[in-house]
C-alpha cells in the first residue's frame, strides 16, 4: 500500500478529511487534507462567539489558498517569516510545516506534513499567542504533537523529504 492509498483509506474510515474549496474558482493546484477535529471546527464548530466563528471562517479561506493559489509564499528562514503563507519549521529534519493565518487576531497556525509534492496534511492547530517565541516549549510541544498524530495515522510512512521548498510545493515563492 502507498501513502496515497493510506490517505484514501483514512478518508473512507472518517479519520481524515479532504478540504475542498467552498466556491471553486478554477483548477485545483494542490491537495489539502485535515484532521477530523480541524474539519469539524472549520465546518460546524463549536464556536463560543460570533467572533470565533468568523475567525474559523477566515482560517478556512486561508487554507483554501493552498489548494487554489498559483504561488505559495515561503520564507527563506522559518524564523523570519513575517509575510510567508507557510513554512517548514525547525529542526528541518522533523518535516513539520505550518500554514499561517494571521488576520484577524488572534492568528492561528495549522501544523502538518507533506505526504507528497503538493499534498499537505494538516493535523493540529493552535492560536498563535499561546505558542510563544519560536523555540518556546509550547512551540516544541505543537511540533511533537503533529509528529505523534502523523505516526498514529501513517505508520510506517514517513513524510516527504526533499529540497526546500520546490520538492514540496509547485510554484513556491521564497521571500
Image: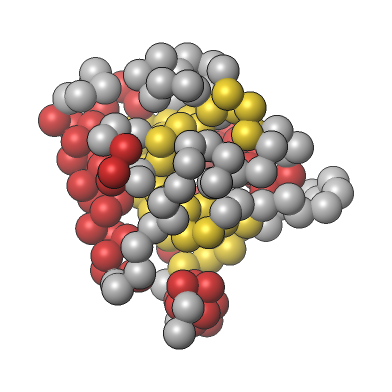
From where the camera sits, is residue 101 visible? no
| Picture quarter with the C terminus | top right
In x, y percent, where is residue 53?
A: 53, 38
Colouring style? secondary structure
From where the camera sits, is residue 69 visible? yes
| Picture quarter with the N terminus | bottom left
| Residue drawn at point x = 39 percent, y = 24 percent | 78
Of all residues, the one furthest to the left in this rendering is 137
In the image, residue 174 sits, relative to residue 3, either above or below, namely above
| Residue drawn at point x = 41 percent, y = 40 percent | 97
In the image, residue 116 sits, relative to residue 174, either above or below, namely below
Count of marks placed on residues: 0
In the image, residue 74 sits, relative to residue 122, either above or below, namely above
Of all residues, the one furthest to the right in this rendering is 26
Of all residues, the one furthest to the front in this rendering is 163
* Image position of 93 (left or right of 164): left
* Image position of 109 (left or right of 104): left
In x, y percent, where is residue 85?
A: 55, 28
In x, y percent, where is residue 88?
A: 41, 36
* Closest to the observer, 45 or 113: 113
In the image, residue 120 sits, relative to residue 165, either above or below, namely below
| Residue drawn at point x = 32 percent, y = 38 percent | 92
* Image position of 148 (left or right of 39): left
* Image position of 48 (left or right of 166): left
| Residue drawn at point x = 69 percent, y = 37 percent | 171
In x, y percent, where is residue 69?
A: 73, 38
Amino acid at each position: 500500500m502507498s501513502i496515497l492509498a493510506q490517505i484514501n483509506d483514512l478518508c473512507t474510515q472518517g479519520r481524515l478529511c479532504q478540504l475542498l474549496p467552498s466556491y471553486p474558482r478554477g483548477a485545483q493546484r494542490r491537495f489539502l487534507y485535515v484532521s477530523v477535529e480541524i474539519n469539524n471546527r472549520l465546518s460546524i464548530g463549536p464556536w463560543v462567539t460570533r467572533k470565533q466563528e468568523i475567525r474559523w471562517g477566515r482560517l478556512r479561506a486561508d487554507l483554501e489558498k493552498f489548494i487554489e493559489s498559483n504561488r505559495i509564499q515561503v520564507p527563506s528562514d522559518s524564523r523570519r517569516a513575517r509575510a510567508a503563507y507557510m513554512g517548514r519549521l525547525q529542526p528541518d529534519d522533523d518535516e513539520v510545516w505550518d500554514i499561517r493565518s494571521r488576520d484577524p487576531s488572534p492568528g492561528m497556525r495549522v501544523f502538518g506534513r507533506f505526504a507528497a509534492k503538493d499534498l499537505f496534511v494538516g493535523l493540529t492547530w493552535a492560536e498563535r499567542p499561546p505558542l510563544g517565541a519560536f523555540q518556546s516549549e509550547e512551540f516544541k510541544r505543537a511540533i511533537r504533537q503533529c509528529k505523534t498524530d502523523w505516526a498514529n495515522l501513517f505508520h510506517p510512512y514517513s513524510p516527504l523529504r526533499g529540497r526546500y521548498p520546490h520538492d514540496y510545493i509547485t510554484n513556491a515563492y521564497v521571500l
